[in-house]
Amino acid sequence: MKIKACLFDLDGVIVDTARYHYIAWKNIANELGFDFSEAQNERLKGVSRMDSLDILLEIGQQKIELAQKNELAERKNNLYLSYIQNMTPEEILPGVIAFLDELHDKGILIGLGSASKNALSILNLIHLTAKFNAVIDGNKVSKAKPDPEVFLNGANELGVKPQHCLVFEDAQAGVDAARNAGMHVIGIGQAENLKNAEFVIPGFEDMNFNRLRSLYF
């Protein structure tokens, strides 16, 4: 077995934009008259904006018309965009740049597979765009994770078969999407939140090519 490409989710893997999503959704929940906890927010990780809103409304036991849903989704995105405009490279999670550089040096292709429609803007803000051979974001897919579309599109753009791709994900929906794509997957975070990942690591501080080779080559 040989890994020829690594695909990364963005939020919570490359940079901690997850907290900005949470603050924005919590604001929307409070507007609707209920609270929204960080534990409940785990269900939204890796999920599209409209599907996240549906989950939020389910948690708050709210039923609203489609027009209002669209308005709330737009308002949430505007809040989120206002939060991330001041992001800098200092917000890249520890160990990420060194690992990406090592993959590049070893000839491993690098792709991004994110449900976020703002992924490219964030990569530009944190000066990481040039490190990716392919960027598949919410503007390039029609199906949200756990559907495998985002990762299959990434593999296709990189010219690599799914079985030779390794995905790094911090969300259960993303782990399931990678599995559904027939790819290998390493979870980032806590094992109890990432069922069916082949391995789970807390972050990239201790991840390097030698460790990757010992696991997959």
Image: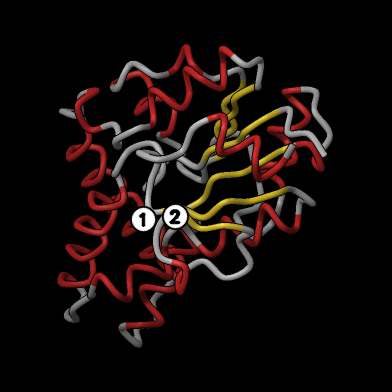
Left or right position of 15 against 114: left
Q: Which mark is residue 49?
A: 2
Q: Residue at x 21, y 66 (%)?
A: 26
User: Around disc 2, counting alpha carbons within 10 Å, would you say few (fewer than 14), some (14 to 19), or many (20 or more)?
Assistant: many
2 and 1 marks in contact (CB < 8 Å): yes
Q: Residue at x 51, y 50 (%)?
A: 169
User: In the rendered view, would you say 193 is above or below 15?
Assistant: below
Residue mark closest to the camera, 2 vs 1: 2
Q: Quadrant of residue 71?
A: bottom left
Q: CA distance from mark 2 to mark 1?
A: 7 Å
Question: From the viewer's perspective, is residue 17 above or below residue 143?
Answer: above
Q: Which comes before the other along the chain, label 2 or label 1?
A: 2
Q: Residue 158 in the image: state x and y as whole percent.
A: 73, 23
User: Label 1 sits on what residue type?
Assistant: Ala
Give the side of residue 164 with respect to residue 138, left or right: right
Q: Which mark is residue 73?
A: 1
Quadrant location, the C terminus: top right
Amino acid carrying mark 2 in the image:
Arg
The residue at the point 17 percent across, 80 percent down is: 33
